[in-house]
Amino acid sequence: MTDDIIIRIRDLKTAYGTHVVHEHLDLDIRRGEIIGVIGPSGCGKSVLLRAITGLKEFAEGSIEVFGERLETLDEAERADVEQRWGVMFQDGALFSNLTVRENVEVPMKEHTQIAPELRHQLADMKIRMAGLSADASPKFPSDLSGGMRKRAALARALSLDPELLFLDEPTAGLDPITAEKFDALIRSLQKALGLTVFLVTHDVDTLHATCDRIAVLGEKHVLAVGTIEELRAFDHPWVQEYFCGPRGRAATGH
Amino acid sequence: MPVATVPGFALEESGEHTILRLTGDWTVMTIHLLDEDLAGLKHDHTVLVDVSGLTRIDTAGAFLIDRTLRAAPEGSGLTGTNDVARNLIDQVHAVSDPTPPAKAVDHGFVALLERTGRGFVGVMSEIFQTLAFLGETIVTTLRLVMQPWKLRWTSIVAVMEEAGLDAMPIIAFLSFFVGMVVAYIGATTLRDFDLEIYTVELIGYSMLREFGVVLTGIVLAGRTNSSFTAQIGTMKMRQEIDAMQTLGLKPMDILVAPRIIALLLMTPALTFVATLSGIAGGVIVGWSSLDINPGVFLDRLRNAVPLEHFWVGLSKAPVFGFVVTLIACRQGLNVGGSVQSLGNATTTSVVQGLFAVIVLDAIFAILYMELGI
């Protein structure tokens, strides 16, 4: 069933100058799943996210999102696609001159015709949904802690009720308890809203707690895709070390 | 994107209930069509919201339904089968707050008084802090000059190149053109009295005493000042300055003192270049439209314009350089965590820099006049 594939990547090649990041990379992401993308530092996890969202031009291959190839769309069609996904960047990338509520309202203000008062209420609802209290709404991003900024960024990514959510290292730099709450939050939002989540992470606990499937990037392509159990059986030194090393074992309870 | 169907609702009275039948897409893209109508409903009976007719729903639509239910009398609820909608509405209900956000109250006259007071206190503390920073800078710089082996020569030379040498072409050009303009004005006015030759004195006095150094100061305030503020401000924003402090390095020693020393050295040099190219502009105009031979021009300049005017101009240069750098560094260190504050600091820095150059020049003019120089 082709309809169930929300992102289809075929034979992707990306490069910065002569430095090739990905080559012959294939990946399918199914509708409604949480897919974790892991790999050693510098293997191009974030670059893959940037390539899918159109922030980084790729050299060869094709990426279809919602069955459309982004580079073939005109501006209006592309804006339509962009409204259907939300992206949360690694350090939040909140607009520092806007309050948290205004940050969440930005996409609504730009793309919908909702009246200001209802928009405020919706923004506050998203902020609470992302696990912040409403007291945070009038604050500026610089007044928030790292974990709160990530939640605010998540609220902004959810602003237009996207079908597809990209999260770049959502739990990096958070304490384990906050990270755990964040994992639970992503899981419950995914269930409630029927999201597809593309999750770039280093955190084994997050993978274990949230992901349906995991894609391992390495050697410029996808080494393996599967559940944690499948990957544990996968014979590759990095994958073995990742899941069967002390941290991996602790997280997955083996 | 699938074509959105228009959302709608219909009211139906059935016994003691009002049934609200929902149809179409209730999403963030469509709910603006319903917002007012739905808010305007007055419910006398309990309301049953029938969600079975919905085609699509998201949290925004769920919020509207939840808001309607909250406004309705006790006992209202959902009816019809639609698990997605029921689930979403439950989720939204848990996190929504029915009270609209409080609006900021404006107290008019009192607020005006408050703003005035805050403004006054702000200006006072700005003056106080500038003076404190001035003192700290002077102490740091003097201490480092006494111990030259502790000076960071590499950064001093780097700043001298960036803020001095690289600014030289622009200052020379500006000054050249101002010299030409002054010469033309002089020539046009003095021609009526057959005194064109006094253009030389006009150029000499104005360039040596005022324009050379003021133009240098203005270019420094616009160019160097903003770049210093942005550099230091960005470092502050990215916590680099905090990192320095924890490593036992003093930002005053590393960031402020080298810039101050570099500009103290370079501003006179820039002023000298500005003065020379201003005179060159005068010479060109004199030669081309007044028939004053460059040799005659320079000879007359030497005889008619005393050297002390040159020293008067040059004496102001280090002061301008010092004050402009001082303002730039202070504003840079004032930057907070946001991009907005960086922009504000840069603006303030340039405005204060220009202001300081002009005001100081006026003070110097009065001072030298009283001294009879």
Image (spheres, coloured by chain):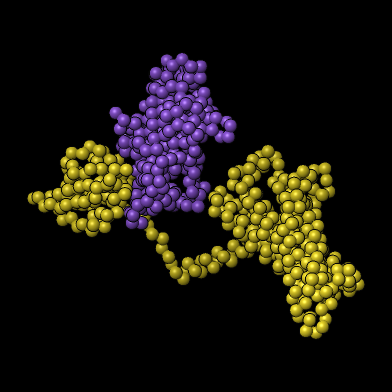
Chain colours: A purple, B yellow
Q: Residue at x 30, y 40 (%)?
A: B91
- Do we see residue A94 in this rendering? yes
- Do we see residue A207 in this rendering? no
Looking at the rendering, which quadrant does residue A66 occupy? Answer: top left
Check the image and report above or below for B273 versus A248. Answer: below
Q: Quadrant of the C terminus of chain A?
A: top left
Frontmost residue, B31 versus B279: B279
Q: Quadrant of the N terminus of chain A?
A: top left
Q: Residue at x 37, y 53 (%)?
A: A120
Check the image and report above or below for B275 versus B18. Answer: below
Frontmost residue, B228 versus B107: B228
Check the image and report above or below for A23 versus A70. Answer: above
Residue A138 position in % (x across, y down): 44, 52
**Extreme residue in the left direction:** B15
**Extreme residue in the bottom direction:** B193
Q: Residue at x 79, y 71 (%)?
A: B288
Q: Is residue B281 left or right of residue B230?
A: right
Q: Residue at x 25, y 43 (%)?
A: B56
Residue B102 position in % (x across, y down): 37, 57
